[in-house]
Image (spheres, grey):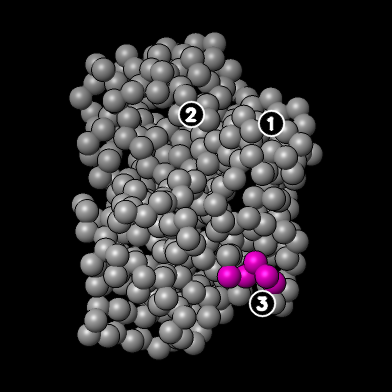
Amino acid sequence: MIQRVAKDKLLDLASKFKAIAVTGARQTGKTTLVKQVFKGKPYVSLENLDMRNFALEDPRGFLASYPQGAILDEVQRTPNLFSYLQEILDNSEIKGLFILSGSNNFLLQQSISQTLAGRVGYINLLPFSIAELDKAKLLPENDDELMFKGFYPPIYDQDIPPSDWCPNYITTYTEKVRHIKNITDINSFERFMRLLAIRAAQELNASSMAIEIGVNVKTIQSWIGILESSFIIYLLKPHHKNFNKTLVKRPKIYFYDTALICSLIGIQNTTQLNTHPSRGAIFESMVITELVKKRTNLGLPINLFYWRDKTGHEIDIIVDSAGKLLPIEIKSGKTISNEFFKNINYWSNLSGEKESILLYAGEQHQKWSTGKEAINWRTLINRDI
């Protein structure tokens, strides 16, 4: 059992809210986590036809079977339960009474917002972090191997090669989305996902993508929303501080998992990855989503942005801590060069902020009196940023 960092936040929320919703992408270990944390609660999978029929035909009787609460998995399959759950939660003083989870975030979030708003604490479970893999002694030493394997639990606990697992995951995902969101042209949606993977770590240009795929901009925006709400992609928003410069306003596209990027763009092994033109973008995706995981697992708001002006000067990450800004540059190279600090120096001159961090693939740790610091990106395991 790989211990999840989010466990502590899950327990904390269960001490404050009467119900907890555990959301996240498919196959991130939501069921495993809730069964481990709430061992004393009955576990009910509403994928089971008999249990689902019971819940649909007699929701009061179904819920009355669990006076001390339960784990209700795939609860979005029984939307009529939520109104009855509302009544139970309003009449109870027990914290952490029901634990709700499901692989369909669209329907689960919709049902909760309609009937249980304000009564439920949320936690998003993302794929493994490097800290979790490191603690379990499963973290690959080689960055290319890590990027190719990605971070989804089945690749580690079931020892399924990513070249086998990822294509099946993508196919299953697109089929589920097709039924839920009534996507009629599944081939265009699959091309859209591949195009997004090629454009990982780039600005989102919906108009350009619409022309390339042959659909309208509203369709692209809808599909982006689907991928974002199902935790396949993360949109990094631009920071607003302009320092009298004209800034870009479009978000940048990142995938939560690098193995999916590799699969979508046809990378079949680490040798291909090592020389692939997208390697730098995949490395950047890995580091940025690791920063996102660190805050998500602790239940903290995401205070990460990027900064880019119209002349092309860009900072990969701006950490905004109540107005104190920390610029971070991400480089996949192993040797520090002055070129790595070009944009940081430019931004520092504009902002007056002196502290900055370079996260890179090399082992050397350098810290200058000027406030600049260069560290291996894996030190994020033990470092708060």
Residue highlighted by disc 1: 216
Q: CA distance from mark 1 to mark 3?
A: 36 Å
Identify residue type, mark 2.
Leu
SS for dot 1: loop
| Relative image position of residue 302 (x, y in whole percent) | 35, 50
Q: CA distance from mark 2 to mark 1?
A: 28 Å
Task: Decide whether residue 215 is among the magenta residues.
Answer: no
SS for dot 2: helix
Q: Nearer the viewer, residue 227 or 53?
A: 227
Estimate how packed mark 2 is, as few (under 14), some (14 to 19) or many (20 or more) residues with alpha carbons within 10 Å.
many
Identify residue type, mark 1.
Asn
Sequence order check, earlier mark of 2 and 1: 2
**Numbered range of the magenta stretch:** 276-280
Quarter of the image where one finds residue 226: top right
Q: Is residue 17 above or below residue 340?
A: above
Q: Nearer the viewer, residue 347 or 260?
A: 347
| Relative image position of residue 83 (x, y in whole percent) | 40, 14
| Relative image position of residue 340 (x, y in whole percent) | 45, 78
SS for dot 3: helix
Identify residue type, mark 3.
Asn
Q: Is residue 356 above or below residue 187?
A: below
Quarter of the image where one finds residue 372: bottom left
Q: Look at the image and tell me whether residue 272 can be seen.
A: yes
Q: Look at the image and tell me whether residue 291 can be seen.
A: no
Q: Is residue 213 above or below residue 273?
A: above
Residue highlighted by disc 2: 108
Image quarter where the C terminus lies is bottom left
Which disc, if any, is residue 274? 3
Sequence order check, earlier mark of 1 and 3: 1
Q: Residue at x 49, y 14 (%)?
A: 80
Q: Nearer the viewer, residue 78 or 350?
A: 350
Q: Is residue 126 above or below residue 62?
A: below
